[in-house]
Image (cartoon, helix red, strand yellow):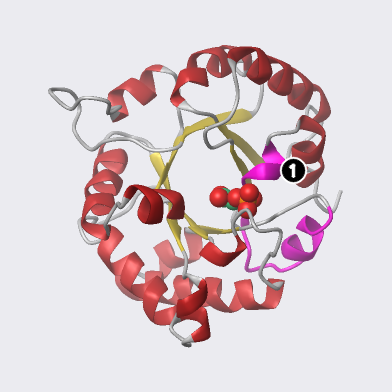
């Protein structure tokens, strides 16, 4: 049985004061949650404050990106060792905003994924098609090519989470239909099993992301193929994120 994961991606939002207030309330609201994993992924500047606040909780910490080298002359970058210093468990890699706004390629993401795993972090690898891909019936082709590219340097992924996030659903208020998400997620698991073996394919958690809200989370989590959610906008409010964490409860 795969343990489900609800992860909040705060993106480029929040001051230390905001983060403290949010996490304080989230801790209270989710203190009775036991049967699923919860993670928050704040910007780098808030990792210190948030990591201190969640020491005595079951909430995991994640970062939103990292560079593949451990240290050196890489101005502006953050290394896996730096993330580990703040007890990060997860690191989001290959988010579509980094692919399409910053210009990250699969080759770039592959180095990050390999480095994260080697350094004991669990990547939340994001894949997903753009609207034009979907309209051209190229969803599967695009997603598989992202998986092949981003996982090309990984031989035996000890721990990895995949988030299927259709680009057209992110931040638009237009989520995918759960059955469409299930179709792509099943295809991802099939690909993964072929690539890394049946056991790994059964174990890998595959999340859905894109306009997840308190009002639609239950419809996604009713689908047994969907192992959780990566939540952007709705994770910036403790009450709405807690409601998402408490899906079907
Ligand atoms: P959203 O973002 O929930 O605001 O659509 C999801 C994401 O980008 O991970």
Instruction: Indicate the position of residue 112 as horizontal and vertical percent values.
Output: 27, 44
In the rendered structure, the answer to whether residue 173 lies left or right of residue 204 reads right
Instruction: Indicate the position of residue 192 as horizontal and vertical percent values.
Output: 39, 69
Which element carries disc 1, helix, strand or loop? helix
Farthest residue to the left: give it.
73
Indicate the quadrant where residue 240 lies: top right
Q: Nearer the viewer, residue 1 or 205?
A: 205
Farthest residue to the bottom: give it.
137
Q: Nearer the viewer, residue 108 or 148?
A: 108
- Name the residue at 56% across, 12% down: 52
Indicate the quadrant where residue 6 lies: top right
Q: Which residue is mark 1?
A: 245
Residue 198 falls inside the magenta stretch: no
Q: Is residue 101 visible?
A: yes
CA neighbours of label 1 inside 10 A, class few (<14), some (14 to 19), many (20+): many
Which quadrant of the figure contains the N terminus?
A: bottom right
Residue 231 falls inside the magenta stretch: yes
Q: Is residue 230 visible?
A: no
Q: Please state the extent of the stretch shown in magenta in the rendering.
A: 215-235
- Name the residue at 58% across, 30% down: 13
Is 163 above or below relative to 61?
Answer: below
Q: Nearer the viewer, residue 28 or 236?
A: 236
In the rendered structure, the answer to whether residue 42 lies left or right of residue 147 reads right
Instruction: Indicate the position of residue 48 as horizontal and vertical percent values.
Output: 49, 14
Is 165 above or below relative to 246?
Answer: below
Instruction: Indicate the position of residue 121 as horizontal and vertical percent values.
Output: 37, 36
- Name the residue at 76% across, 51% down: 213
């Amino acid at each position: 049985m795969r343990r489900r994961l609800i992860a909040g991606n705060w993106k480029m939002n929040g001051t230390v004061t905001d983060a403290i207030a949010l996490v304080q309330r989230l801790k209270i609201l989710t203190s009775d949650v036991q049967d699923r994993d919860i993670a928050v992924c704040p910007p780098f500047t808030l990792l210190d404050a948030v990591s201190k606040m969640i020491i005595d909780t079951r909430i995991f910490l994640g970062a939103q990106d990292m560079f593949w080298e451990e240290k050196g002359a890489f101005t502006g970058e953050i290394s896996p060792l730096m993330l580990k210093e703040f007890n990060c468990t997860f690191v989001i890699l290959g988010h579509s905003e980094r692919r399409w706004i910053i210009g990250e390629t699969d080759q770039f993401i592959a180095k990050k994924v390999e480095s994260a795993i080697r350094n004991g972090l669990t990547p939340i690898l994001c894949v997903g098609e753009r609207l034009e891909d979907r309209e051209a019936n190229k969803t599967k082709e695009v997603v598989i090519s992202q998986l092949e590219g981003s996982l090309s340097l990984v031989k035996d992924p000890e721990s990895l989470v995949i988030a299927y996030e259709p680009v057209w659903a992110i931040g638009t208020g237009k989520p995918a239909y759960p059955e469409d998400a299930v179709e792509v997620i099943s295809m991802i698991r099939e690909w993964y099993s072929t690539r890394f073996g049946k056991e790994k394919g059964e174990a890998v958690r595959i999340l859905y992301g894109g306009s997840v809200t308190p009002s639609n989370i239950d419809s996604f989590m009713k689908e047994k193929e969907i192992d959780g959610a990566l939540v952007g906008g709705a994770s910036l409010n403790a009450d709405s994120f807690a409601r998402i964490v408490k899906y079907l409860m």
